[in-house]
Amino acid sequence: MTFRFSHDHVGITVTPDDLDTTIEWYSGNLGFTVDQKFESHGTTFVYLVAGDVKIELLAGASNPGMPVSNVLTSMDPERLHHFCLAVQDLDAAVSQLRERDVQVIGGPMDIPEIGQRIAFVADNLGTIIELTEPGTWPNGGRAHA
Protein backbone atom coordinates (compact mmCIF):
# COMPACT_ATOMS: atom_id res chain seq x y z
CA MET A 1 0.00 0.00 0.00
CA THR A 2 1.29 3.44 -0.94
CA PHE A 3 0.13 6.47 0.99
CA ARG A 4 -0.57 9.77 -0.72
CA PHE A 5 0.16 12.60 1.67
CA SER A 6 -0.52 16.29 1.62
CA HIS A 7 0.50 18.66 4.37
CA ASP A 8 -2.21 19.76 6.80
CA HIS A 9 -0.59 21.69 9.67
CA VAL A 10 2.27 22.07 12.14
CA GLY A 11 1.45 21.86 15.85
CA ILE A 12 3.35 23.98 18.36
CA THR A 13 2.89 23.68 22.10
CA VAL A 14 2.87 26.88 24.14
CA THR A 15 2.08 27.71 27.74
CA PRO A 16 -1.30 29.31 28.42
CA ASP A 17 0.55 32.48 29.46
CA ASP A 18 2.32 32.64 26.07
CA LEU A 19 -0.70 31.90 23.87
CA ASP A 20 -1.87 35.46 23.17
CA THR A 21 1.64 36.84 22.57
CA THR A 22 2.37 33.94 20.22
CA ILE A 23 -0.83 34.63 18.24
CA GLU A 24 0.21 38.30 18.06
CA TRP A 25 3.74 37.37 16.92
CA TYR A 26 2.56 35.18 14.04
CA SER A 27 -0.15 37.69 13.07
CA GLY A 28 2.00 40.80 13.26
CA ASN A 29 5.22 39.42 11.77
CA LEU A 30 4.12 36.74 9.30
CA GLY A 31 0.55 37.79 8.48
CA PHE A 32 -1.25 34.76 9.94
CA THR A 33 -4.87 35.12 11.02
CA VAL A 34 -6.87 33.14 13.57
CA ASP A 35 -9.07 30.64 11.76
CA GLN A 36 -10.39 28.79 14.83
CA LYS A 37 -9.96 28.97 18.58
CA PHE A 38 -11.58 26.47 20.95
CA GLU A 39 -11.10 24.48 24.16
CA SER A 40 -11.19 20.71 24.36
CA HIS A 41 -9.92 18.22 26.94
CA GLY A 42 -8.25 20.91 29.05
CA THR A 43 -6.33 22.38 26.11
CA THR A 44 -6.87 25.57 24.13
CA PHE A 45 -6.43 25.06 20.38
CA VAL A 46 -5.78 27.94 17.99
CA TYR A 47 -5.49 27.45 14.24
CA LEU A 48 -3.55 30.19 12.47
CA VAL A 49 -3.65 30.39 8.68
CA ALA A 50 -1.82 32.22 5.91
CA GLY A 51 -2.51 31.04 2.39
CA ASP A 52 -2.17 27.26 2.32
CA VAL A 53 -0.20 27.15 5.59
CA LYS A 54 -1.86 26.23 8.88
CA ILE A 55 -0.26 26.30 12.34
CA GLU A 56 -1.96 24.77 15.36
CA LEU A 57 -1.06 26.31 18.72
CA LEU A 58 -1.83 24.08 21.71
CA ALA A 59 -1.90 25.60 25.18
CA GLY A 60 -2.44 23.30 28.13
CA ALA A 61 -0.77 21.63 31.06
CA SER A 62 2.89 20.77 30.43
CA ASN A 63 4.07 17.18 30.83
CA PRO A 64 7.82 17.27 30.00
CA GLY A 65 9.50 13.90 29.68
CA MET A 66 6.29 12.15 28.66
CA PRO A 67 7.08 8.81 26.97
CA VAL A 68 6.61 8.81 23.21
CA SER A 69 3.75 6.32 23.64
CA ASN A 70 1.85 9.14 25.38
CA VAL A 71 2.80 11.83 22.87
CA LEU A 72 -0.82 12.82 22.27
CA THR A 73 -1.11 14.00 25.85
CA SER A 74 2.40 15.47 26.04
CA MET A 75 2.75 19.23 25.89
CA ASP A 76 6.54 19.06 25.77
CA PRO A 77 7.67 22.13 23.78
CA GLU A 78 11.05 20.56 23.03
CA ARG A 79 9.82 18.04 20.45
CA LEU A 80 9.73 20.29 17.35
CA HIS A 81 13.08 21.36 15.87
CA HIS A 82 11.77 23.64 13.11
CA PHE A 83 9.21 24.00 10.39
CA CYS A 84 9.71 25.52 6.96
CA LEU A 85 7.76 28.14 5.02
CA ALA A 86 8.38 28.83 1.33
CA VAL A 87 8.62 32.46 0.21
CA GLN A 88 8.91 34.00 -3.27
CA ASP A 89 11.91 36.23 -2.48
CA LEU A 90 14.01 35.19 0.51
CA ASP A 91 16.11 38.35 0.67
CA ALA A 92 13.01 40.59 0.65
CA ALA A 93 11.32 38.44 3.31
CA VAL A 94 14.37 38.51 5.58
CA SER A 95 14.71 42.27 5.10
CA GLN A 96 11.05 42.84 6.06
CA LEU A 97 11.36 40.57 9.10
CA ARG A 98 14.49 42.39 10.27
CA GLU A 99 12.56 45.67 10.00
CA ARG A 100 9.97 44.08 12.33
CA ASP A 101 12.75 43.15 14.80
CA VAL A 102 12.30 39.43 14.13
CA GLN A 103 15.39 37.51 15.23
CA VAL A 104 17.26 36.16 12.17
CA ILE A 105 19.37 33.28 13.44
CA GLY A 106 20.92 32.01 10.20
CA GLY A 107 21.33 32.90 6.56
CA PRO A 108 20.31 33.70 3.98
CA MET A 109 22.49 30.98 2.52
CA ASP A 110 22.63 28.89 -0.64
CA ILE A 111 22.20 25.12 -0.38
CA PRO A 112 23.25 23.85 -3.83
CA GLU A 113 22.58 20.22 -2.93
CA ILE A 114 18.84 20.91 -2.78
CA GLY A 115 18.74 23.92 -5.11
CA GLN A 116 17.39 26.30 -2.48
CA ARG A 117 18.26 29.43 -0.54
CA ILE A 118 17.31 29.30 3.11
CA ALA A 119 17.32 31.40 6.25
CA PHE A 120 16.21 30.79 9.80
CA VAL A 121 14.25 33.03 12.16
CA ALA A 122 12.89 32.45 15.65
CA ASP A 123 9.42 33.28 16.92
CA ASN A 124 8.67 34.92 20.28
CA LEU A 125 9.20 31.59 22.09
CA GLY A 126 12.33 30.56 20.20
CA THR A 127 10.63 28.15 17.78
CA ILE A 128 12.86 27.92 14.72
CA ILE A 129 11.23 28.75 11.39
CA GLU A 130 13.13 27.96 8.23
CA LEU A 131 12.33 30.16 5.25
CA THR A 132 13.11 28.78 1.81
CA GLU A 133 13.24 30.23 -1.65
CA PRO A 134 12.86 27.22 -3.90
CA GLY A 135 14.89 27.41 -7.07
CA THR A 136 16.21 25.35 -9.89
CA TRP A 137 19.92 26.02 -9.59
CA PRO A 138 22.52 24.61 -9.98
CA ASN A 139 20.77 23.22 -13.07
CA GLY A 140 20.37 26.49 -14.94
CA GLY A 141 18.75 28.57 -12.19
CA ARG A 142 20.24 31.42 -10.25
CA ALA A 143 22.61 31.31 -7.32
CA HIS A 144 23.25 34.15 -4.91
CA ALA A 145 26.64 35.23 -3.64
Image (cartoon, helix red, strand yellow):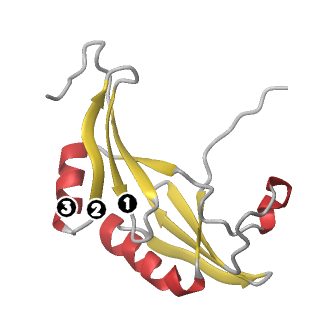
**Within-10-Å neighbours for mark 2: few <14, some 14–19, many 20+:** some
Q: Quadrant of residue 47?
A: bottom right
- Identify the amino acid type marked 3: Arg
Q: Quadrant of residue 77?
A: bottom right
Q: Outermost residue, top direction? A: 139
* Picture quarter with the N terminus: top right
Q: Which residue appears at 27% of the width and 55% of the height?
A: 104
Q: Is residue 43 left or right of residue 94?
A: right
Q: Is residue 52 left or right of residue 16?
A: left
Q: Is residue 89 visible?
A: no
- Identify the amino acid type marked 1: Ala
Give the alpha-carbon distance from disc 1 to disc 2, as whole Å: 6 Å
Where does residue 107 sit, x and y in percent of width and height? 26, 43
Give the alpha-carbon distance from disc 2 to disc 3, as whole Å: 7 Å
Secondary structure beneath dot 1 equals strand
Disc 3: which residue:
98
Secondary structure beneath dot 2 equals strand
Disc 2: which residue:
103
Q: Are marks 1 and 2 in contact (CB under 8 Å)?
A: yes
Where does residue 132 sit, x and y in percent of width and height? 35, 41
Q: Which residue appears at 43% of the width and 82% of the height?
A: 21
Badge 3 or badge 1: first in the primary sequence? 3
